[in-house]
Image: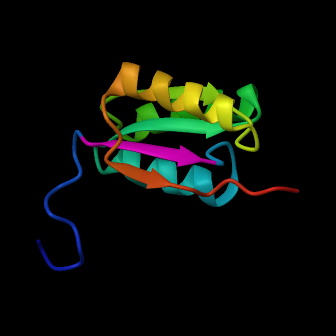
Amino acid sequence: MAEGGLSGPPAGQVALVTGAGRGIGREIALGLAAAGMRVGLLARTRSTLDATLSECVAAGATKAVAVPTDVTHTDRVRGAVATVERDLGPVDLLVANAGLR
């Protein structure tokens, strides 16, 4: 394992970010995209997800998918993860950032 805890470059790996529509989750998603990761974006609001999706592609994500999801519903989260894995591959990194207002 390399210093800092990463076993190799993240390019091409899959990250799943909850709360990706705004704030810290959005910024994390953009950073992972800039590192060349494929990013799965989860948040409740389609419009904010679509904006983050466009920004992630522009930042360098090799591929990205946005899935509107309310993480307070386990069955919806399972479906969202299945969609991300179908479209991007197995998840290598999970950023559990979603919060409740």
Please say if 8 is above or below 32.
below
The spot of residue 90 in percent (x, y) is: 31, 35
Magenta stretch contains residue 15: yes
Q: Nearer the viewer, residue 28 or 89?
A: 89
The spot of residue 7 in percent (x, y) is: 15, 63
Q: Quadrant of residue 42?
A: top right
Quarter occupied by the N terminus: bottom left
Q: Nearer the viewer, residue 3 or 48?
A: 3
Residue occupying image coordinates x 72% and y 26%: 46
The spot of residue 16 in percent (x, y) is: 46, 43
Would you say 10 lies left or right of 43 here?
left
Give the magenta range: 13-18
The spot of residue 3 in percent (x, y) is: 16, 79
Q: Residue furthest right?
A: 101
Residue occupying image coordinates x 26% and y 42%: 13
Question: In the rendered picture of this protein, how many numbered marks are placed on residues?
Answer: 0
Please say if 53 is above or below 21.
above
Q: Quadrant of residue 70?
A: top right
Most prominent secondary structure in the magenta stretch?
strand
Would you say 27 lies left or right of 37 here?
right
Residue occupying image coordinates x 35% and y 26%: 88
Magenta stretch contains residue 71: no
Would you say 29 lies left or right of 51 here?
left
Residue occupying image coordinates x 45% and y 28%: 84
